[in-house]
Image (cartoon, coloured by chain):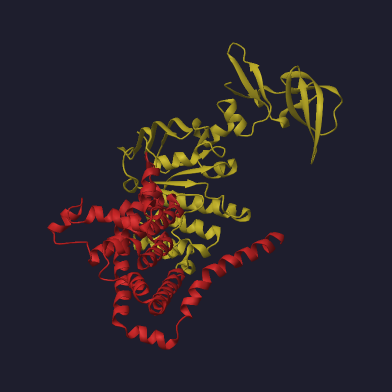
Amino acid sequence: MKLKALFLPLSLVILIFLFLPVFSILTGITPIQYIHSLKDRQIVSSILLSIELSFFATILVLILGVPLAYLLARSKFPFKGVLEAVVDIPVMIPHVAAGIALLMVFQANGYLGEFFKKVGISFLDTPYGILIAMMFVSSPFLINSAKEGFKKVDERVEFVARSLGASPLHTFFKISLPLARKDIVNGAIMMWGRGIGEFGAVVIIAYHPMTAPVLIYDRFTSFGLNYALPITALVVLISIAIFIVIRVLNNLEK
Amino acid sequence: MGYLEVKNLHLKKGAFELRNINFSLEKGDFLAIIGKTGSGKTVLLETLTGIHKPKGKIILEGKDITNTPIEKRGIGLVYQDFMLFEHMSVKENLLFPKNRDINLFNRLVKQFDLEKLLLRKPKSLSGGEKQKVAIARAILSKPKLLLLDEPLSSIDFGFRYMFLEFIRDIHKEFNLTTIYVTHNLKEALNLSNRCGVLINGKLLQFGQTGDVLKNPKNSAVAKFLGYKNILDGKLVGLKDMLFSVSPYNICVGDCGDFKLDVELVSLIKKEAGFLAKVRAKSELFYIFVREKPPKQFKVGFKKNDMVVFEK
C-alpha cells in the first residue's frame, strides 16, 4: 500500500507531462480554426502525403522486416547481437544524421542512388526520398515488436503443426504469423505513427513535397506559432484518431 | 526388421546428452518410456519427430527417416501441454492436418464427444477437453507412429483413470504404434506391452513391461522402480551382485533360506504395523513388522523373494 502511495503521485507527474502538451495543442485552436485548416489545401495535402507515404513505408517493412524479425526470434547464429544492433541503429542516431546517411547512399552518385537512377527513381526532393527516410528511422519499431511477438509463440506449436504435415512456410503463415499478429500490428502502428511524425531525416533528403511536420516547421519559422498551430492540432488529432481505431480493432478478438 | 528401429541414437543438446539409444518396436506395440523429470524423455520424442538432428539411425516401416523433415515423417506428437493452435477453433485445429479425412473427422468428433466444442477456442476448454482435441488432431493426421508426452499430467487426478482407459481404447481401435512417456509406473503398467527405463539420457533397460518391472537390470533401474533394500551380495560361483528383498517379504524369527541378526535403528508407524529400519553388519535396510520388535532380533527371507541385478 505504501508503495502504491509513493508510485501514484510519481506516475501522475509523468502522465501529466505526457498529456498536457497534446491537450494544449488540441485545445489551442477553436473549432472554426479546425474547419479552416481542413479547407487549406496545402495542409490537407501535406497530412495526406505523410499518412500515405508512412503507410507504404510500413507495408514495405512488413514485407522485408517481418521475415528478419522471425529469423532473429528463432535462429541462433554467431554475431546475432551485431545484427540486432544494426536494426536498432536508426533509433540511436540523431535523425538529421540519419538523413545525411541516407543522402550519402541514395544521392545520384551514391551506392544505391546510381542503380535507382538507371530505373528512373530519384530520391532528392521526391516522395521516394520521404519514403526511405520514414522507412529508415521507424522500421526498428516494427521489426523489434514483431521479433518479440514471434518469441512469445512457443516453438513447439510450430513443431506440432509440422508433425501434422504442414511445410515450414505453411506453418509460418498459418500458425506463427497469426499468433504474433497483435505484436506485429502494434509495431506497424508505432512505425506508421513514427513515420508520419518524422522530420529530421525527411527534411534533409526531401524538403519538398512537404510532409505535415515539414509544413509545421516551415510555417513556424516563416510566420510564427499562430500559423503553425492549426496544422499541428489537425495532425495530432488525425493521428490519435487513426491509432485508437486500429488499436481497438487489433485488440478485438475474432 | 521391426516396424520402428532406433539404432545407436545419440544427441547432444547443451549440457544434456541422449546416449546410445537402441530399441525396436513391432506394429501396434505400445511402448512406455519411463524416467524421472530431466531424464531426456521429451527430447527422445522430439528427436524421433525430427525436431533435433541426432547421430545414429531411425528406421520406420523399413525406411531410414533420420534426416527426413518433420512434416514428411508421419509421426504424430502430442505434448503434455497439448500445443493447440489458440487462434483457431477446435474444428479448425482438427482439420489442420494435411492428411485429414472428413469421414475420420466425423467419426472422431462423435467418438471423442467433441460436437459441442467444435466452434470453441482452445482457451475456453478444460484440460481433459484439450487433451481429447490434441489426440484427435494427431490421429487425424493418420500417423504411422503416435508419440504422447506425459499426456495425463495436465488432467485432474480424478479423471486420470478415465483417460487411461480412453488412451488404451484408442490404441486398440486404431492399432497405432504408440510411444508414451511418463514418470508414473502405474500408467506404464496399465497401458504398455513394452517398457523402457530412461535415466540421465541412457535407455538402461528395454523389454516386455512385466519383465522390466519385475527384473530390473541394475541398481539405477531398481531404485527408479521403487525397489527398497538394495543390498550387496555374492552369488555362489558368480560375480558380485546386488539384490533386493521387499520389506514385506522379510520374516521375523528363525525363518527363510537366509538368516540375519539385526539391530533396530528406528521405527515408522504404518497402518497395520511398523516399518523398521534395521542394521545387519554395515548394511541398513527396511522390514515390515506387525509388532514393535526388540532392540536385537533375527530375520530371514526366502531365496525366491530375492530380485538379483547387476551392480
Question: Which residue: 55% across, 37% down?
Answer: B35
Q: Residue B38 location, x and y as percent? A: 54, 38
Nearest to the observer: residue A248 or residue B307? A248
Q: Colour of chain A?
A: red
Going by the image, does B79 lie left or right of A51? right
> Which residue occupies the foreground of this view, B154 or B29?
B154
Residue B146 placed where, x, y %? 42, 47
The mark total stands at 0
Residue B188 to residue A145: above or below: above
* Residue toward you, B257 or A6: A6
Image-quadrant location for residue B214: top right
Q: Residue furthest left?
A: A118
- The yellow chain is B
Give the quadrant of residue B23. Answer: top left
Side of A157 relative to B124 (left or right): left
Location of the N terminus of chain A (image quadrant): bottom right
